[in-house]
Image: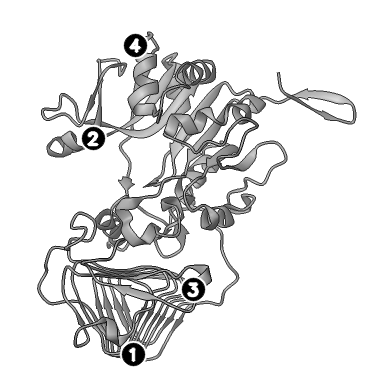
Amino acid sequence: MPNYIIQGVVFLIHKEMIAMLLAGGQGSRLGVLTADMAKPAVSYGGKYRIIDFPLSNCINSGVDTVGVLTQYQPLRLNTHIGIGIPWDLDRNIGGVSILPPYEKSDNAEWYSGTANAIYQNLKYMEYYNPDYVLILGGDHIYKMDYEMLLDFHKANNADITIASYPVAWEDASRFGLIITDENKQVVDFEEKPAKPRSNLASMGIYIFSWKLLREALVALSGQSGCDFGKHVIPYCHKNGARIFSYEYNGYWKDVGTLSAYWSSNMELIDLVPEFNLYEEFWKIYTKSDAIPPQYIAQNAVVSRSIIGEGAEIYGEVYNSVISPGVVIGAGTKVYDSIIMNSSEIGENSNIYKAIIAESVKVGNNCELGIGEEKENKQHPNIYCNGLVTLAEGTVIPDGIRIGKNTVISGVTTAEDYQNGWLDGGESLIKKRPLLAHAGSEESESAKGGTV
């Protein structure tokens, strides 16, 4: 059994429940927003990052030992989490630990599936000798008391408890569904069935009794791309494990698509928001930089919007979420948009239904999100619902007009636009220069570019 020694006295390390937070996903359905960062690191709500929500749930629920499994573009995420100070997770025993894939003595192996990622960190879990292991995703917006989930698990003498969410019956065929009996014990599973027998969707949140989890992970260690929903839980069910469904009825949003991400942010500014960021009893914690307060100029107009610290508003903002450090120039009007940290919008521009990533510069006299709505030619399932999406660090020169369902990435110039116009449904992606050729950049249109 693991132990630690202080002044010659041996102490056994034991945690009732530890959390393993899966935060290594690329989030490809968020398009250019995740080109340089993992989905859990994407800004949300004018102040936070997506991973703040499960981390805050952990500390609010009394879970003080969290392993964060990272893989894809982890730098921004690692920097944001640090040693866990904002979440009170900077602890000598427990706290937060970043768990990237690492090279072993015999081989180097990337995480290949949710369960495989957990399996590669068996030693981390063994160190704390837990009774229970809480498995979480790092890419959902919700508030959940995991202590209530654990109490449910204990009360049912469960081996596995799956958090489930009742979805609309007409949407049930899009989810992995759980079939339960009258005692909420799981009797069957359905993966995106044409004719669903249940509307309880798995949230990807699980409590495992530690001994069962370890046995299952070791037994399935040779399975390529091993996943909890597809492999581990069916394996345990087949072998007689007691599996129960904990039905959650609070706010829960998968912000894995641009449309869902946009609509979830817009819900925050409803007159009576369904998801309230201002509750005292269940705070959402985040890393806060030392920046000056927001500034609203004398002639500025702000209506039903979130305005982050350090933002400077000289124009007009309606129904929008504005992050810290954003500057909106005089005469500019912003409608139904998300503008992330440190972006600058010039003067006398009009912005309609845009998602503007961090450190973007939009020039003077520009118009974004105008004209007829056309399907995006390259990725119609990503860039849709009339949105304009600008990737991190993008530059739009003065006088440019941009249609709907468009995406732009890179430092663009007037020559990249035909008569100063990017038609609806088009994509303008500037290739990132290689370090050896940092002085050159190449522009691509929708025909040849990739996102």
Distance, label 1 to label 4, CA atoms, is: 63 Å
Density class for disc 1 (Cα within 10 Å; few <14, some 14-19, many ≥20) is many
* Residue under pointer 1: 347
Are the residues tagged 3 and 4 within 8 Å (C-beta)?
A: no
| Residue 143 occupies quadrant | top left
Q: As displayed, is residue 365 above or below residue 445?
A: below
Query: Mark 3 or 4 closer to N-term?
Result: 4
* Residue under pointer 3: 437
Are the residues tagged 2 and 1 within 8 Å (C-beta)?
A: no
* Residue under pointer 2: 175
* Residue under pointer 4: 238
Query: Mark 2 or 1 closer to N-term?
Result: 2
Residue 206 or 26: which is nearer the viewer? 26
In this rendering, would 172 be left or right of 416? left
- In the image, what residue type sits under mark 3? His
**For the residues carrying marks 3 and 4, which lies nearer the camera in this image?**
3
Could you tell me which quadrant the N terminus lies in?
A: top right
Query: Mark 3 or 1 closer to N-term?
Result: 1
| Residue 205 occupies quadrant | top left
- Residue 2 on image: x %, y %: 71, 23
- Residue 29 on image: x %, y %: 30, 52
Density class for disc 2 (Cα within 10 Å; few <14, some 14-19, many ≥20) is some
